[in-house]
Image (cartoon, coloured by chain):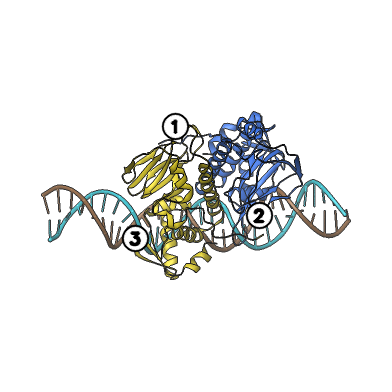
Chain colours: A yellow, B blue, C brown, D cyan
Amino acid sequence: MLTQLNHNHSAPAAFAATGRDPAVQSLLAHTRPCAVSFYRPNEVIYAQGESVGPLYLVEFGAVRICRLTADGRRQISAFHFAGEVFGFEPAGEHENYAECIDGAGIRLLRPNAEEGLGGNVLTIALRTLARAQDHLLLLGRMNASQKMAAFLVDLFDRQDAVSVIDLTMQRNDIADYLGLTFETVSRALKVLKEASVIRLPSVNQVEVLNLSALQRLAG
Amino acid sequence: MLTQLNHNHSAPAAFAATGRDPAVQSLLAHTRPCAVSFYRPNEVIYAQGESVGPLYLVEFGAVRICRLTADGRRQISAFHFAGEVFGFEPAGEHENYAECIDGAGIRLLRPNAEEGLGGNVLTIALRTLARAQDHLLLLGRMNASQKMAAFLVDLFDRQDAVSVIDLTMQRNDIADYLGLTFETVSRALKVLKEASVIRLPSVNQVEVLNLSALQRLAG
DNA sequence: CGACCTGTTGATTCTGCTCAATCAACGTGG
DNA sequence: CCACGTTGATTGAGCAGAATCAACAGGTCG
């Protein structure tokens, strides 16, 4: 049984910047018009314990979805960028909280009639599930270098990048997403740099020099 | 920001044995009658790469949902027991594969009309997502003992157990679910046993002696 | 009985965490 | 303009926890 690699659970990259992936577009058609609200860096979009409300569409910027252990350790279950929908949780209270990373525009998706948002909610929810399951494999069965490589490949695909990836989030966020410490994240990047797989033009930019090597490392 | 503990994303335990949780029941009402098929231990229910088909309901027995890394390491993303529905994946090819663990009866859920299965699919899919996100926290931010304790608490809740938990799956499966090796699973159980939190009446039974201690360890 | 499979236990290795120092970038106030 | 504090990132040293390697025990089935 061979592994099928390079799944793509995101909206097609070409649509990402505008948020006009077909399933998302159809979702928008079922919503009441709603203004885009702006969130400042680290501002909370919804908190843990709040009652679950509508879905959210990222118009621009980046968002992190988090959860805490009893002793205060954080796990980021997903990052969301322009064109992506988040806020999927069972009815009741939010078990995750969502925060803005850098300054983002978020549109609320409120159904325009009692019939609801239509079948595309399920489509997008299943994508979210598939991404979470990919991430289970990463957290459970990869070492630090593999995690880092997989993370960069994922960002590369989602950003429609030619060669330079933007790291909007900081090392601590990456660490809490990959199940590492920020020191280990720093070291993993260093290893990739010294292997000439990437370059680091600035603290929050990664230039991919050897994509196939990166993909190979990503397992 | 405090953590909300003891979520329960499963069907209510009282319904588990019969598979008659409200959302599942309503799902059944929208399906064409379909016989229960029996799977033998380790038999494949659907394979990676197969095209995604219907949903599945466990009538009795246990099922594991798996995925492989490129180098053949396995991550089990979920176990499913009587009364639970599985098979949620985006349209296209299965990225996970499902196997029977011990001998199980599985009912296919085929929609009885073109209108589909109704809104309850989303409800159950979101439960599955929430469980996956819980598991992300476990894999990313817990140590071996915490993982083991959390696993036992989860089984305890889902089995409607009074004190004795049935471990239908073997050590290797538990390890691949918790992101550990089977040796570490064995040692983690030993630690809990020596702390008088559990007893091991037999290889595949765990008697819970101190539930609150177990819950505390589970973070 | 022997072969095999699963699980337990022990010894050793190694990856990634912890603790700590240093550095660069940035903003503020004198 | 520079001194200072702050914050995020990098780097180093030492340690701990889990993986690996290996031996062995118990059970099952031919």
- The answer to whether residue A73 shows anywhere in this view is no
Identify which residue, D19 or B52, lies in the foreground: B52
Residue B93 falls in image quadrant: bottom right
| SS under mark 2 | loop
Quick check: marks 3 and 1 in contact, CB under 8 Å? Answer: no
Depth check, front residue: B164 or B72: B72
Q: Are marks 3 and 2 in contact (CB under 8 Å)?
A: no
Residue A187 at x, y percent in the picture = 42, 61
For the N terminus of chain B, give its image quadrant.
top left
Q: Is residue A135 above or below residue A217?
A: above
Label 3 vs 1, first from the N-terminus = 1
Q: Which mark is residue A203?
A: 3
Q: Are marks 3 and 2 on the same chain?
A: no
Q: Residue at x 51, y 36 (%)?
A: A90
Circle 2 residue = B50
Give the alpha-carbon distance from disc 3 to disc 2, as whole Å.
42 Å
Mark 1–mark 2 contact, CB under 8 Å?
Answer: no
| Quarter of image, res A36 | top left
Q: Nearer the viewer, residue A172 or D12?
A: A172
Q: Tell us which disc is closer to us: 1 or 2.
A: 2
Q: Is residue B67 visible?
A: yes
Q: Secondary structure at mark 3?
A: loop
Structural distance between the alpha carbons of marks 1 and 2: 38 Å
Q: Position of residue C24 (x, y in %)?
A: 28, 62
